[in-house]
Amino acid sequence: MEFENVNIECDSITATHGEEVRVELCEYIKRLCKNLDIFDYEGLLDIEFEDTLTSGASGYCGGDETICTVSIAWNDQVGIIEIAEIKRHLAHECIHAQQIMSGKLINEGLRLCIDENDNKAISYVVIWKGEEFINTPYYERPWERQAYGNEVRMMEESSC
């Protein structure tokens, strides 16, 4: 299903949770994207659902201003993830999509860096609002703090 610049992979929703849940999630995603102004960006947001994700994650978001992909897991280490939690995960990852599509969050990936002692090391580099972050611990990342700080509000504002 596609809403302007947002493509939602619907087949797995229907297969795992039925038509009613598919309609509910698709409408929720549409409201979420509207609330995050994602429809205002020129890039494409692709949302897909997987049985499980790497490392037991509940969701991932990656890409750039042109194409951004959100992946959401149906199951975690405990079992099936409840729809309310799926919505929270969608809110969190779509906040990242908005950060990426707006150009505020740029994943530079791995880079060979030289430290103050002239030692070479492979480092994970991200640009957040023009500032470079190298190997920043997960919960210290300002883009993660923003996503965690706003996911419940976005979920509530986007629910019926």
Image: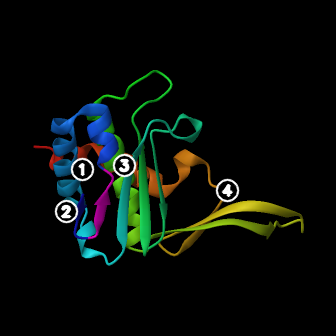
Secondary structure, magenta segment, majority class: strand
Q: Given the current orientation, which residue lies at the most extreme left position? A: 160
| Residue depicted at x 24% and y 57% | 1
Label 2 or label 4, whichever comes before in sequence order: 2
Alpha carbons under labels 4 and 1: distance apart: 28 Å
Location of the C terminus by quadrant is top left
Left or right placement of residue 66 versus residue 16 in this view: right
Q: Position of residue 105 (x, y in %)?
A: 47, 67
Helix, strand or loop at disc 1?
helix
Residue 66 lies, with reference to residue 35, above or below; the image says below
Q: Given the current orientation, which residue lies at the most extreme bottom position? A: 42
- Which residue corresponds to mark 3? 92
What type is the residue that disc 3 sits on? Answer: His
Helix, strand or loop at disc 2?
helix
Q: Which mark is residue 100?
A: none
Label 3 or label 4, whichever comes before in sequence order: 3
Left or right placement of residue 106 versus residue 136 in this view: left
Label 1 or label 2, whichever comes before in sequence order: 2
Crowd band around label 1 with a 10 angstrom C-alpha radius: few (<14), some (14–19), many (20+): many
Front residue of this view, candidates 133 and 158? 158
Give the mark toward the camera: 1 or 2: 2
Alpha carbons under labels 2 and 4: distance apart: 32 Å
Q: Which mark is residue 34?
A: 2
Residue 13 lies, with reference to residue 2, above or below; the image says above
Q: Is residue 56 magenta?
A: no
- Which residue corresponds to mark 1? 154
- Which residue corresponds to mark 4? 135
Helix, strand or loop at disc 3?
helix
Which range of residues does the magenta coloring cover? 5-9
Alpha carbons under labels 1 and 2: distance apart: 11 Å
What type is the residue that disc 2 sits on? Answer: Lys
Label 3 or label 2, whichever comes before in sequence order: 2
